Structure formats: structure tokens, C-alpha cells
Amino acid sequence: MNTMQDRNLGSHPTAHGNEMGAKLMRVGEFVLRYGLAAVFLWIGLLKFTAYEAKNIEGLVANSPIWSWAYQSLGLQTLSGLIGAIEISIGVLLAMRAFSPKASAIGGIGAAITFIITLSFLLTTPGIWEAGYGFPFPSAMPGQFLLKDLVLLGVSIWIAGEGLMAAARRR
């Protein structure tokens, strides 16, 4: 049943809810895509600083994926390499308006990044709270890394949306 306010607006509550829902989804999509791009660009740039390199040392030194590079390249060079990769992913994600395919590639790169960072849950000392163990993550780095599960989902969604949009353009 329409309320007086709905009748005055000339809309059905469901139509109003659908319209508001669609607006929120568009805003959410924008924040997902460009927020993730901003995070990759920002954190990628920080990888060129000594303090950020030091922050990732415990993660890369204990990772079977990165430890060889850590030993071969040294911490600051590896951090810069990771930063360059992250900046590239951020740029690709942000290219959606011009190239959905580029954004999809960025989404795939982001997904790979988050799969790698989630692997740190298995390899980094101090992930689980001392005296508790699994499933009680420490604040740092355990809880810090858990957010990457959601960011992995965002990345996969961006990749899929970009591929669909690129296919529609053909």
C-alpha cells in the first residue's frame, strides 16, 4: 500500500526502492573500482620508501613466492619491484572508462596479488595470536591480511565486469 508520501511523489515504494538501490549500486561500483585503484597506486608509491620496505620484510622473507627475490635483489629493490607492479595494476584498474579490457587485466593482476598476500597467512610467523593459535589472528599481521579476502572478491568482480564490457564493445 502506498503511503501519503509515496502518493505525493507519484512513485510506488518498490520503484523508489529500486531507483535508490540502483543509485547505491552505481556509487558502490565506482568506490570498489576506483578505491581499489587508488589503494594500489598509493601503496605502490609507498613501496619506494625505506619504511614501507621494512614493513613488508617479514612477509616476503618468509614467503616461498618472494623469499628468493628477497635474497637475490635485497629488500629495497624487491619493494620497488613490487611497487612498480602495484602502480601498474592501479593504472590498469583506473582505465575502465577508456578500456574495459585493461581494467579486467588490472582486476586479474589485483586478484593474483591478493592470492599471494593471503598465502602469507600460511607462511608468516606471528599470524595467529600467541597462546590461542588458529583461528585467532593477531592484530598485525593476521587481521591486517584477512581484509585481502574481500579485496580478492572485488578484484575478481572487476575482472569479470571488465571482460563482459569489453565483449559488448566488440
Image: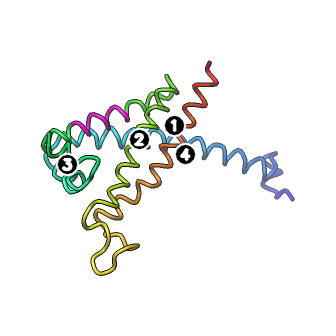
Residue toward you, 32 or 125: 125
Q: Please provide percent x and percent y for residue 68.
A: 20, 45
Most common SS among magenta residues: helix
Magenta stretch contains residue 85: yes
Quadrant of the image occupied by residue 69 = top left
Label 1 with label 2: CB-CB less than 8 Å: yes
Residue beneath disc 2: 110
Disc 1 element: helix
Query: Which residue is at a point 29% across and 43% down the rendered structure image?
Result: 43
On residue 159, the disc is 1
Residue 150: percent from the left, percent from the top? 47, 54
The residue lying toward the viewer, choosing from 49 and 68, is: 68
Is 168 rendered above or below residue 37? above
User: Reading the chain from its start, which is encountered first: label 3 or label 1?
Assistant: 3
Q: Amino acid at mark 4?
A: Gly
Decide whether residue 42 is among the magenta residues: no
- Left or right: where 135 falls relative to 1: left
Range shown magenta:
81-90
Q: Nearer the viewer, mark 4 or mark 1?
A: 1
- Mark 2 and mark 3: Cα distance apart in space: 19 Å
Say which label, 4 or 3, has the lower sequence index.
4
Instruction: Please state which amino acid type lies under the numbered disc 2.
Output: Ala
